Image (cartoon, grey):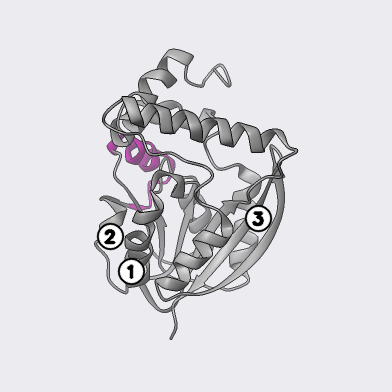
């Protein structure tokens, strides 16, 4: 499905009926051949935008997955880059993609870092957290950054009602609600709970000052923005 190298419909169904961790362990070898991977134009635009605020020494990719964000950090940071994820399968793919990165298996709602990074990023992962879980995630990133550190969050903006993306995201989220009502363990993945205004609000509540950069990238009727959370000096 999606491409000859991507997962089959059966494999996607197995993933959807698993927990988030086991589902991504299963999907990891084929994840980069699905539409769920952050598009390269979004990564490129994010690198260009973040480079304006550098240089950076140490970087952290939160929910690094197969390593797409680590390749961006590798271009932005002069010293060590670190990726953290709780899927061993995804970390295995990231290790092959970016051998120089330090990889840590951990729950990002309890990040095990303190004041060690100049730059943190996350791409395409916030939908795996309920809105009530984002404060713990953002507070952990805040602790992990040095004073003056920057947190870049790339987000697709909520599409217009007249677009295909609007109805696709609505249908997907409704399907997830039904799935999680009748099947355990739950598979948390919602597109419409991570809007730019709500994420901006939660970043500010965690202590960040926040500005928004339009990435001027469109993919599948979605416009993308980069939220820049700055930890005060």
Task: Report which residue position mark 1 lands on.
Answer: 144
Q: Are marks 2 and 1 in contact (CB under 8 Å)?
A: yes
Task: Report which residue position mark 2 lands on.
Answer: 111
Task: Report which residue position mark 3 lands on.
Answer: 45
| In-image side of 21 versus 156 (left or right) | left
- In the rendered image, residue 188 lying in the magenta stretch gets the answer no
Callout 1: SS: helix
| In-image side of 61 versus 210 (left or right) | left
Distance between the alpha carbons at the discs numbered 2 and 3: 27 Å
Upstream in sequence: badge 2 or badge 1: 2
Name the residue rendered at 63%, 71% in the picture: 52
Q: Position of residue 28 (x, y in %)?
A: 39, 31
Name the residue rendered at 45%, 50% in the picture: 126
Q: Position of residue 53 (x, y in %)?
A: 58, 73
Within 10 Å of the Cα at label 3, are there few (<14), some (14-19), or many (20+) other Cα atoms? Answer: some
Range of magenta residues: 88-102
Name the residue rendered at 41%, 48% in the picture: 64
Callout 2: SS: loop
Distance between the alpha carbons at the discs numbered 3 and 1: 24 Å
């Amino acid at each position: 499905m999606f491409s000859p190298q991507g997962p089959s419909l059966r494999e996607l169904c197995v993933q959807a009926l698993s927990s988030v961790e086991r589902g991504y362990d299963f999907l990891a070898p084929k994840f980069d051949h699905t539409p769920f991977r952050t598009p390269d134009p979004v990564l490129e635009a994010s690198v260009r935008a973040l480079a304006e605020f550098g240089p950076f020494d140490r970087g952290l990719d939160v929910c690094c997955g197969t390593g797409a964000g680590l390749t961006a950090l590798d271009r932005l940071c002069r010293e060590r880059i670190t990726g953290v994820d709780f899927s061993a399968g995804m970390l295995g793919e990231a290790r092959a993609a970016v051998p120089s990165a330090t990889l840590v298996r951990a729950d990002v709602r309890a990040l095990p870092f303190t004041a060690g990074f100049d730059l943190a990023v996350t791409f395409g992962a916030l939908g795996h957290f309920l809105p009530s879980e984002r404060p713990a995630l953002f507070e952990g990133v805040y602790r992990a950054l040095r004073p003056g550190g920057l947190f870049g969050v790339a987000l697709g903006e909520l599409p217009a009602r007249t677009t295909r993306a609007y109805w696709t995201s609505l249908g997907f989220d409704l399907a997830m609600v039904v799935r999680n009502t009748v099947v355990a363990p739950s598979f948390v993945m919602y597109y419409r709970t991570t809007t730019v205004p709500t994420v901006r609000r939660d970043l500010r509540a965690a202590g960040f000052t926040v500005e928004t950069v339009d990435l001027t990238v469109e993919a599948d009727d979605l416009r993308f923005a980069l939220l820049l959370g700055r930890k005060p000096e």
